[in-house]
Amino acid sequence: MVVAGATGLELVSHGVLPGTQVLDEIDGACSLPAPKLSFESVGPSESGSFFSAARHRRVGYTIAYPPAHRPGDALPLIVMLHGYGRNHSTALVGMTPAQAMALRGNGAALTPMAMVTVDGGNGYWNPHRDDDPMAMIVDGLIPFCQRKGLGVAPEKIGLMGISMGGYGALAIAERFPGLVSAVAAISPAVWTSYAQARAANTGAFASGTAFGSGDVIAHASSLRGIAVRVASGVDDPFHPGVEQLVSALPSSRTEVFSAGCHTDSFFLEQEPLSIAFLARHLT
């Protein structure tokens, strides 16, 4: 329970959340039972780094393949975006990318897909003057993976993210609607105004204009034709913004509003369900 609450408490202390959930953390209201996870024998993974011109630095990455597959196989691709304070090696909660691709649900294995994680910094996956993680994803990481046979048509690409990464997945899909076929956002960090965002985290957006360009509520109609799953705990401080987002999304979306806060226990509960959602729409 202590671990499950650590992320939310740390983000509150750094001013990243638009409110507090400290009392809920202390009395245990945010804790959820750990899901029972089942895995196939995991497939191979490769980790390394490449120089990103968009980020002006080398970035680390991990590519995980499904069981009984190997590098060079043509597969659909999930691009998994990490949350605030995390990186490519900690993008998922409670499992590695290779385990995520080996998950079993309802007694059945996932349809084979690959997953990539990458270092995106803490700039909310949107453009800044000297650091553009969005361009790194679109112009760097995805072509890098496609050269390895992943996400190359007719194989599909999906975006997934937690918290800041959930916002980033939505923002990238809205800005580049022809790029991906499906999006799964877990507890997306959605602010409803630039003033709210700036009061909570001055580094999230470079300016009010940047916020307007990356306002996932205002641009939600751009996701028409894309399968979208949004999961949010009803006690998450970001939940009011998520409710506005879901109201603005095309009717084909899937929303999951259930007990939980902005904590690892909720993220872990929703990861297998989000991955299964992407599997249905990418394969």
Image (spheres, helix red, strand yellow):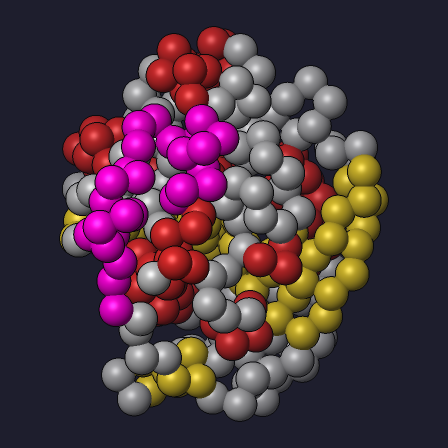
x, y (%) of residue 225?
A: 32, 44
What's the residue at 57%, 74% (across, down)?
Answer: 98
| Horizontal relation, residue 87 to residue 107: left or right | right
Q: Quadrant of residue 224?
A: top left
What residue is rendered at 64% in x and 22% in y? 128
User: Does the segment drawn in magenta span residue 264?
Assistant: no
Q: Is residue 160 above or below residue 66?
A: above
The mark total stands at 0
Which residue occupies 58% across, 57% down? 90
Left/right of residue 256 with respect to residue 91 in the rendered view: left
Which residue is at a point 51% across and 76% down the rendered structure image?
A: 99
Q: Is 21 contained in the magenta span? A: yes
Q: Nearer the viewer, residue 164 or 78?
A: 164
Look at the image and tell me whether residue 201 can be seen: yes
User: Farthest residue in the front direction?
Assistant: 26
Placement of the N terminus among the 4 image quadrants: bottom left
Q: Is residue 173 left or right of residue 69?
A: left
Q: Is residue 79 above or below residue 276?
A: above
Quadrant (top left, top right, bottom left, bottom right) of the C terminus: bottom left
- Rendered location of residue 253, percent (x, y): 23, 47
On the image, the x and y values in percent for residue 64 come to 61, 71
Seen from the viewer's position, the closer of residues 162 and 44 is 162
- The magenta-colored residue range is 8-33
**Camera sees residue 230:** no
Residue 128 sits above or below residue 52 on the image: above
Q: Position of residue 148 (x, y in %)?
A: 72, 65
